[in-house]
Image (spheres, rainbow, N blue to C red):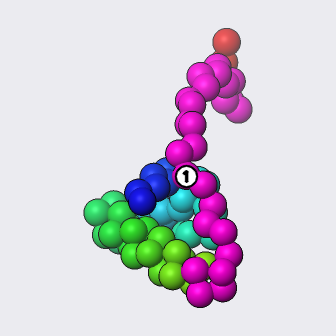
Amino acid sequence: MINTYTAKYTKIDAGYMGQLVEWPEVITEGKTLEECREMVQDALKEMIKAYRQQKKELPLGRALLEQIPVEVDYVGQTA
């Protein structure tokens, strides 16, 4: 069975932080985006093993993400 999870990547000072939207406990960091992607996949596989050993139900994947545009006034900005 194949399940699909949604990864979110955030640029941080040390490189990138990756986290699964549907499974927030799966979180890691990498120096590059590619390294972070690999580490997220590894962390996911390890978390699945741990959940199976504990006989816990895996979170469902397939989150729906939507970007919501909004106009924001910045401090110090003149009209």
Give the farthest residue toward the left.
Answer: 34
Q: Is residue 72 above or below residue 64?
A: above
Place of residue 40 in the rendered image (x, y in percent of width and height, measured from the top left): 43, 68
Number of disc labels: 1
Q: Which region is colored magenta?
A: 52-77
Would residue 35 be visible to someone looking at this image?
Answer: yes
Q: Residue at x 66, y 29 (%)?
A: 74
Examine the rendered structure and indicate whether residue 35 appears above or below residue 66. Answer: below
Q: Is residue 60 magenta?
A: yes
- Determine which quarter of the picture holds residue 31: bottom left
22 or 56: nearer the viewer: 56
Residue at disc 1, secondary structure: loop
Q: In this rendering, does residue 7 appear at all?
A: no
The residue identified by callout 1 is 61
Query: Would you say residue 35 sits in the magenta stretch?
Result: no
Task: Name the residue located 63 percent from the left edge and 61 percent from the top edge.
Answer: 59
Q: Nearer the viewer, residue 76 or 47?
A: 47
Outermost residue toward the bottom?
53
Residue 2 in the image: state x and y as whole percent: 41, 57
Give the quadrant of residue 77: top right
Front-most of 74 and 61?
Answer: 61
Q: Which quadrant does the C terminus fall into? A: top right
Horizontally, residue 78 falls left or right of residue 8, namely: right
Q: Residue at x 57, y 37 (%)?
A: 64
Amino acid marked by disc 1: Gly
Q: Position of residue 41 (x, y in %)?
A: 39, 68
Q: Residues within 10 Å of mark 1 (few under 14, many from 20)?
A: some
Q: For the N terminus, give its image quadrant.
A: bottom left
Residue at (46, 55) in percent of width and height: 3
Q: Mainly helix, strand or loop, the magenta region?
A: loop
Image location (x, y in percent) of residue 62: 53, 45
Residue 23's place in the image compared with 77, above or below, is below
